[in-house]
Image: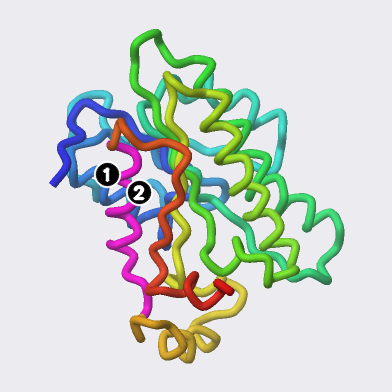
Amino acid sequence: MTDLGGKRVLVTGASQRLGAVLAQAFAARGAAVVVHCFRSREEADALASSLPPCPAPGHEVVSCDLADPDSVRRFPSVVGPVDVLVNNAAMWIRGDAPQSELDRQESVNHLAPCALIRGFAAIRPAGRDFAAVNILDAAAISGADPSPYAASKRALLRDTFELARELAPEIRVNAVAPGPVFPPCELGDAGMKRIPGTLPLKRPVSPADVADAVVLLASSRSVTGSVLAVDCGQSMLQQP
């Protein structure tokens, strides 16, 4: 198992679901985890308290509305330097939602991750390693899904490559594109039950496997500008 002792890792949207699994994976490898939340402070506090102990200052909980550009701009200076940024927080909004909600989705899913990468890069102490991993969506990064949610994830995919080029050689930027792990909160489990049978590996994606991929990209100093699909073969179905 990769040893991340002494590293400080920020996971956005870490209070529950995949974000909590990612926080647990980094903590299990010795990292001090900064658990970001927006409204789920109680769940975030409980998660931070449950993580394996680490040296001072230990695990922390921070709040920020990632749909608010001013809050996002201030956030890196509030948190302080980190070694790893995992842009996991995301919104899933129906395409017929009010424009204000669609704008929030674009901010959380695309604009905020890019701003945070640049913001934390700007405060990185000289010589300190810094890597960012963006969480995409295997279904959304193909051109087949016309939804605003998919568009926001495709935009983040494009900017993953752009930021990797822009910030090299000091900073690495990669992404993981999970397949069906958890259903959108608004849909519940019913819509997920039929999906595994349509995948080449005939099973749902393991959250632990997604976390392993994120840790790999965060810690591999020879990798930047890469996207790793952890999707039980879902992306193969979208190839010509």
- Give the image location of residue 14, x and y in percent: 43, 50
Q: Nearer the viewer, residue 238 or 77?
A: 238
Secondary structure at numbered mark 2: helix
- Give the image location of residue 6, x and y in percent: 21, 26
The residue under label 1 is which amino acid type?
Phe
- Which residue appears at 66% of the width and 31% of the height? 71
- Which residue appears at 31% of the width and 33% of the height? 222
Mark 1 or 2, nearer chain start? 1
- Mark 2: few, some, or many residues within 10 Å (few <14, many ≥20)? many
- Which residue appears at 74% of the width and 70% of the height? 94
- Give the image location of residue 216, x and y in percent: 28, 45
87 left or right, relative to 7: right
139 left or right, relative to 93: left
Q: Which residues are magenta?
A: 204-219
Quadrant housing residue 27 = top left
160 left or right, relative to 57: right
In the rendered view of the protein, which quadrant contains the C terminus? Answer: bottom right
Foreground disc of the pair 1, 2: 2
Q: Is residue 164 visible?
A: yes
- Which residue appears at 57% of the width and 32% of the height? 163
Residue linked to disc 2: 214
Position above or below: 83 against 138: above
Residue linked to disc 1: 26
- Give the image location of residue 147, x and y in percent: 74, 68
Secondary structure at numbered mark 1: helix
**186 is within the stretch colored magenta:** no
